[in-house]
Image (spheres, rainbow, N blue to C red):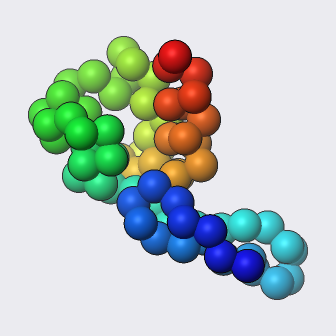
Amino acid sequence: MHRTEPGGEAAHRTGREGRVSGRLMTVDEVAAYLRKPRSWVYGNWQREGIPFRKVGQALRCRPADLEKWLDRQS
């Protein structure tokens, strides 16, 4: 079973645990998805509550978390 996530990637099932796993979106991908400049995303992610997680020194976001965040913005 495949479904399209923000960022254009397909999620896939892991078979072992039956959990849906997908790739993490970069800041650039989130900015493109939100149609905002990269600088806006970096400058506002904490204040706006964009659901990034730090992976090393990089910010990454799960597509499903971004969708949930967007749903709460209206």
Residue displayed at 39% across by 19% down: 48
Camera-nearest residue between 5 and 13: 5
Residue displayed at 65% across by 76% down: 2
Task: Locate residue 40: give its quadrant.
Answer: top left
Residue displayed at 45% across by 55% down: 6
- At which x and y percent is residue 39? 13, 34
Judge left or right: residue 42 versus residue 72: left
- At which x and y percent is residue 45? 34, 27
Task: Locate residue 26: give its quadrant.
Answer: bottom left
Residue lying at the far bottom in this picture: please name it: 15
Residue lying at the far right in this picture: please name it: 17
Residue displayed at 85% across by 82% down: 16
Does residue 11 sit above or below 31 in this rendering? below
Camera-nearest residue between 39 and 5: 5
Q: Is residue 47 visible?
A: yes
Judge left or right: residue 14 versus residue 32: right
Camera-nearest residue between 17 and 30: 30
Does residue 34 sit above or below 62 in this rendering? above
Camera-nearest residue between 40 and 72: 72
- The N terminus, quarter of image: bottom right
Judge left or right: residue 3 versus residue 24: right
Q: Can residue 56 be seen in this view?
A: no
- At which x and y percent is residue 51? 49, 35
Q: How many numbered marks does the figure carry?
A: 0
